[in-house]
Amino acid sequence: MSHKPVPPRPGQGAMAARLAEILRVDHAGELGAVHIYRGQRAVLGQAPGRERIAGQLAEMEAHEAEHLARFDRLLTERRVRPTAMAPLWRLAGFAVGAGTALLGEKAAHACTEAVETVIEEHYAGQIAELADRDPELAAELSRFRDEELAHRDLAVEEGARQAPGYSLLSAVIRTGCRAAIKISEKV
């Protein structure tokens, strides 16, 4: 997929408005990801014989929590309001995480693969857009994207694509992620 930088909008303050959208949506995405992993860990974390996946989920949640903390700081530093949808994204993330975990380990991994695929595409577009305008932020997003790709690759290695109903499950989760991105940019 080719990622063309979004041209700056005309008018005074347009670039600042676009940066606010980027920070708001990225913060929302990391918030949702933390809660997806929390939901998955609530189901799989203490289950006997599930120590391996519990450790993987905890590690991925820790990466997402680090990203979220960074976006918390960026929102404060740049005086950007978080999305008003945050309470819903917390609940939805936890529900998606717990729901996929209840379907089994492969479904939990399918969730990770679907989410991280959308996020990688999303970050790639932002990185291209910000490369010249804000190279420091673009570099941070590149690091975060690389960690998201590692999560996706792990999920694939762990059998994400062998989950029951994989195609439908993945399509629904990707569509939900894309909708949440559009909503969080504005609301």
Image (tube, rainbow, N blue to C red):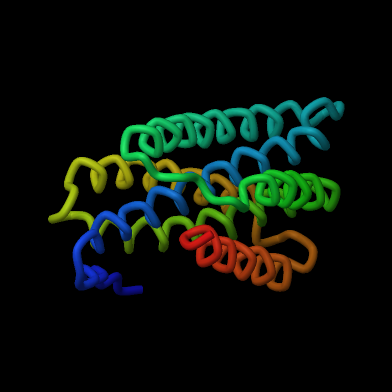
Q: Quadrant of residue 110?
A: bottom right
The residue furthest front is 12
Left or right position of 134 against 26: left
- Identified at 74% across, 26% down, the residue is 51
Describe residue 93's horizontal placement relative to residue 178 as left or right. right
Residue at image position (50%, 45%) is 82
Depicted 47 relative to depicted 148: above or below:
above
Choose between 167 and 86: the one closer to the eye: 86
In the rendered view, would you say 45 is above or below 31? above
Residue 123 in picture, x, y percent from top left:
37, 56
Q: Nearer the viewer, residue 106 or 187?
A: 187
Q: How many marks?
A: 0
Q: Nearer the viewer, residue 36 or 133?
A: 133
Q: Residue at x 54, y 28 (%)?
A: 62
Q: Is residue 82 left or right of residue 48?
A: left
Q: Position of residue 89 (x, y in %)?
A: 66, 50
Tell me the quarter of the image containing the C terminus.
bottom right
Q: Residue 115, located in which quarter of the rendered image?
A: bottom right
| Nearer-the-camera pick, 77 or 135 | 77
Counting from the top left corner in percent of width and height, residue 13 is at: 23, 59
Q: Position of residue 149 (x, y in %)?
A: 44, 49
Question: Is the N terminus in the top left, top right, bottom left or bottom right quadrant?
Answer: bottom left
Q: In this rendering, would 65 be left or right of 71? A: right
